[in-house]
Each structure stands twice: as C-alpha cells, then as structure tokens.
Image (cartoon, grey):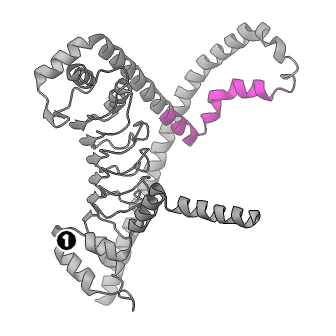
C-alpha cells in the first residue's frame, strides 16, 4: 500500500507540475510559434510588390501547390511583423530585398541574413535578441532598428556598415553609455540615433542634459537623437563641456589611423617586393640568426651580443635600402623594355594580319 500510495502521490505531483501556470504559458507560446515557410513568405510580400505577389499566388512549383521560388527573386520588400516567428530562416530565395521587417516576433538570434547584400532597411525591433551578430555582409544597410530587445553590448555591430545612417538601440540592456557612444564614432554617416530606455550605469536617468551632452560631444554629426532634432548650438555646448575627453579620443583616433595607414603601406610594399622576389631580404638577418644551429646554445647569453647584432642590422638596413633602390630601378627598366617588346610583337602581328587580308582580297578579285 505504501508503494502504491507513493506511486499515486508521484503521479499527482507530476500532474500538478504539468498544470503549473508557467508550464502552460510555455506550451501555449510554443503552439503559437510560426516557422518561415513558402506560404508565409508569399503572404508577407508588401503592397509595392502586389503584381509579383499575384504571380506567386497563381503559380505552383509542384503538385502540393507551393509558390514557385524563382518568383521570390524579384521581391524587394518583405513584411513579417507580428507573425510569432522564432527563427530567421528560408530567406535564401530572395536576392533583391531592400527592406525587411521582422519586428514584434520571438526571434533570439540574428542569423541567415548574410546573402541579403542589397538590404537597406532592417527592422528587428521588439524581439528577444541578446547579441548583435550576422550583419557583416550587409554593407548597403542604412537603417537598422534593434529597439526593445535584450542587447547588452554593441560589440558585434560590424565596422563594414559604413552606410549606416539610422540606428535604433533604445529599450535594451546597454549599461555603458560612454563606451557605446565612443564605439559608434566608427560610423561617420550616422545621423539618426535612438538610445533611450537603457539602464545606463553611473548616470542619473532623470538627468537628460548629461546624457544628451555625452552623446552629442562624441557624435557631433547627429541630426536627431532619440527622435528629437539636434541643433548646432547643442553640439557646440556639449563639445565644450566634454572638451578634454573629446580631445583625448580624437588624438587616439588620429594615432590609430596613422598606424593603420602605415600598416597598409607596409603591406602594399611587401606585396610589391614579393612580386620582384625581394620580400625575403626584409628579414634576412633575423632568419639567419634563427637558422644558426649554435643559436639555441647561446640563447641565454644573447644580451652580450645585443650591441653587435644591432650594429649589424643597422648596417644591413643601410646597404639594403640602396640595393632595393637600384634593383627597383633596374626592374622598372626591364619592365619597360618588356612592354616595348610586347608592343613590337603586337605591331608585327597586326601588320602580318593586314598583309594576309590584302592577299586574300587580291585572290578573290
């Protein structure tokens, strides 16, 4: 009886668990979840594509009356708001989309959008997205809304979105305002920004002036902040208040840009040197030292050889600079000679072809 009573109590406990309100709510939401399929896509092509939608609805790809995928290729706008979508998928049939609305759904991850390289307008507001990702290839994007999600950092917002003009990140879980606005300086075309509704750390939520000054001091190209017009005198005032911080950031950015330009020049130089078989000369001394079989044995005493090795490297650099200059000049002369040779061959070929054509004409006469 006790075992049976225990079994009955266990069953009763399980039944109680199944009827708990939160479990019932989870089941109800799961039943409402909607996958993205061909039928939904056909329904969501917006009004500016009415003719295309009519073609899709009247055509079939198979006996099961599925819309013909090739017709989706021409669509340029898709509205899937309030569709209980939980995952972004099956959009690979679209090749020309410029506008995509996925707001007010249950999406948690930004995915499967990389092929939409023509996309200019993307609305992912009112979802449960926690992380910005999967947008690297959307370089044509100029309007992005991630309003009312669960995003804690803008770290995943890619530098490749250089055409971005409108960005909405309000009502998320961002905490570091200073870090956020400094990071957004990477987007020089940004004109309309919404950040309201985040719980900024070390910032009084009622102090709108401090919040506005911090945003405008670092993002002085904005025309609208939180849907309010930004005027030049507001930007000037903010930059005066934050002058020291702004100067520090701009100095660091200038230094970073110079370093990046130097790296680009160096990379281009190495590509050129490799094309003329001189790339190995740049690290010749280091390679020789590393290849020396005695090197591991004297590694602990290398400090004794620092000065002689430094002098050797300096002398080599001086000699190398002159050698490269002479070699490049000689290589340039050889390239010009080769170009003249190729041009002469081409000229002879053309003359020969002309003579052959003339002979054929004479034979025909």
In this rendering, the count of numbered labels is 1
What residue is shown at x 34% (from left), y 39% (from top)?
172
Instruction: Measuring from the top left, give residue 176's x and y in whole percent.
Output: 38, 27
Instruction: Measuring from the top left, give residue 277's x and y in whole percent.
Output: 61, 39
Secondary structure under the numbered disc 1 in the rendered image: helix
Q: Which quarter of the rendering shows the N terminus?
A: bottom right
* Residue on which the image places disc 1: 49
Q: Is residue 310 left or right of residue 236?
A: right
The crowd level at tag 1 (other Cα within 10 Å; few <14, some 14-19, many 20+) is: some
**Does 285 lie within the magenta span?**
yes
What residue is shown at x 38% (from left), y 72% (from top)?
353
Q: Is residue 234 left or right of residue 88?
A: left
Q: Which quarter of the rendering shows the C terminus?
A: bottom left
In which image quadrant can residue 28 be found?
Answer: bottom left
Which stretch appears magenta?
A: 267-293
Res 34 visible:
no
């Amino acid at each position: 009886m006790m075992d049976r009573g225990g079994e009955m109590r266990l069953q009763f406990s399980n039944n109680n668990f199944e009827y708990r309100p939160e479990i019932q709510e989870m089941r109800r939401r799961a039943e409402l979840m909607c996958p993205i399929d061909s039928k939904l896509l056909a329904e969501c092509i917006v009004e500016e594509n009415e003719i295309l939608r009519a073609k899709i609805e009247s055509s079939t790809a198979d006996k099961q009356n599925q819309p013909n995928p090739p017709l989706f290729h021409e669509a340029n706008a898709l509205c899937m708001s309030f569709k209980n979508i939980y995952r972004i998928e099956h959009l690979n049939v679209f090749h020309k989309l410029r506008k995509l609305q996925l707001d007010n759904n249950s999406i948690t991850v930004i995915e499967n959008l990389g092929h939409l390289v023509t996309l200019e307008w993307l609305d992912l507001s009112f979802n449960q997205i926690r992380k910005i990702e999967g947008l690297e290839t959307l370089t044509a994007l100029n309007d992005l809304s991630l309003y009312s999600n669960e995003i804690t950092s803008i770290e995943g917002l890619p530098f490749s979105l250089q055409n971005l003009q409108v960005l909405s990140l309000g009502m998320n879980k961002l905490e570091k305002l200073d870090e956020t606005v400094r990071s957004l300086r990477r987007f020089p075309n940004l004109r309309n920004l919404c950040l309201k509704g985040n719980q900024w750390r070390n910032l009084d939520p009622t102090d709108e002036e401090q919040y506005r000054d911090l945003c405008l001091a670092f993002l002085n190209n904005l025309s609208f902040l939180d849907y309010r017009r930004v005027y030049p005198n507001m930007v000037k005032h903010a930059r005066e208040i934050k002058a020291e911080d702004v100067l520090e950031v701009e100095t660091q950015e200038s230094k970073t840009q110079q370093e990046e330009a130097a790296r680009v020049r160096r990379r281009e130089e190495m590509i050129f040197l490799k094309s003329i078989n001189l790339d190995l000369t740049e690290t010749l001394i280091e390679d020789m030292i590393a290849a020396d079989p005695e090197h591991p044995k004297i590694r602990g005493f290398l400090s004794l050889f620092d000065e002689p090795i430094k002098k050797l490297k300096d002398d080599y650099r001086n000699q190398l600079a002159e050698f490269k200059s002479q070699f490049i000049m000689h290589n340039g002369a050889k390239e010009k000679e080769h170009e003249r040779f190729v041009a002469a061959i081409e000229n002879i070929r053309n003359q020969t072809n002309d003579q052959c054509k003339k002979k054929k004409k004479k034979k025909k006469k």
